Image (spheres, grey):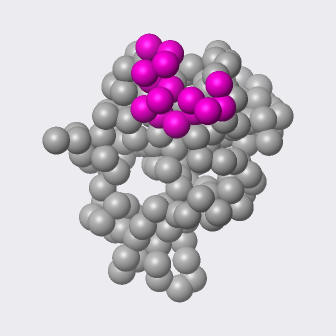
Amino acid sequence: MSDLVLGQLEALGLEYELVDCDPELADTAAFCDAYGYSADDSANAIVVVGKSEPQTFAMCLVLASTRLDVNKVVRKKLAARKASFATAEQTMELTGMAIGGVTPFGTTIELPLWIDSRVVERERLIIGGGSRDRKLLVPPATLTGHPHAEVVEGLAKPIE
């Protein structure tokens, strides 16, 4: 899957830096602790599902220091009665990536990409790299350069 990630980034001419990581430390909190990144500079790619039939899916990108607003903002954007996080199996099926390595680039199918407005205010962000053994360090312009990107105000809320 990693080749699809780098292939899409290269094809779009987007800036990125590869950051190797121990797959055992790929989950956000463990990664930030081990490698010295702030949760404010780390963004999580989260696949969400609308529970209406047919089910609809999207990918959301939010800072690790925030919580995705699934019940209001995501549900409304999906035009569904209920919305939730996709399961690890659904995420793998839709992206080809395991939790801890999910990135908006090189997914198995095209998904809308909703980026919380706080993400684009950061100077550089660490995001999933397509597999659990690497991350990508990118400027916000790389994320907004994704062909299905939409910046959404209030997509996430600060964790209290």
The answer, for residue 109, to whether it is visible in the render is yes
The answer, for residue 78, to whether it is visible in the render is no
Where residue 40 sits: x, y (%)? Answer: 34, 25
Q: Is residue 88 above or below residue 17?
A: below
In which quadrant of the rendered image does the C terminus lie? top left
Q: Is residue 16 above or below residue 7?
A: above
Along the line of sight, the residue nearer the viewer: 145 or 73:
73
Where residue 6 sits: x, y (%)? Answer: 76, 29
Where residue 56 sits: x, y (%)? Answer: 54, 71
- Residue most extreme to the bottom: 53
The residue shown at (64%, 18%) is 19
Which secondary structure is most common in the magenta stretch?
helix
Where residue 27 sits: x, y (%)? Answer: 52, 37
Along the line of sight, the residue nearer the viewer: 124 or 19:
19
Identify the magenta region.
Answer: 22-36
User: Is residue 62 shown in magenta?
Assistant: no
Left or right, 2 with respect to 86, comes to right
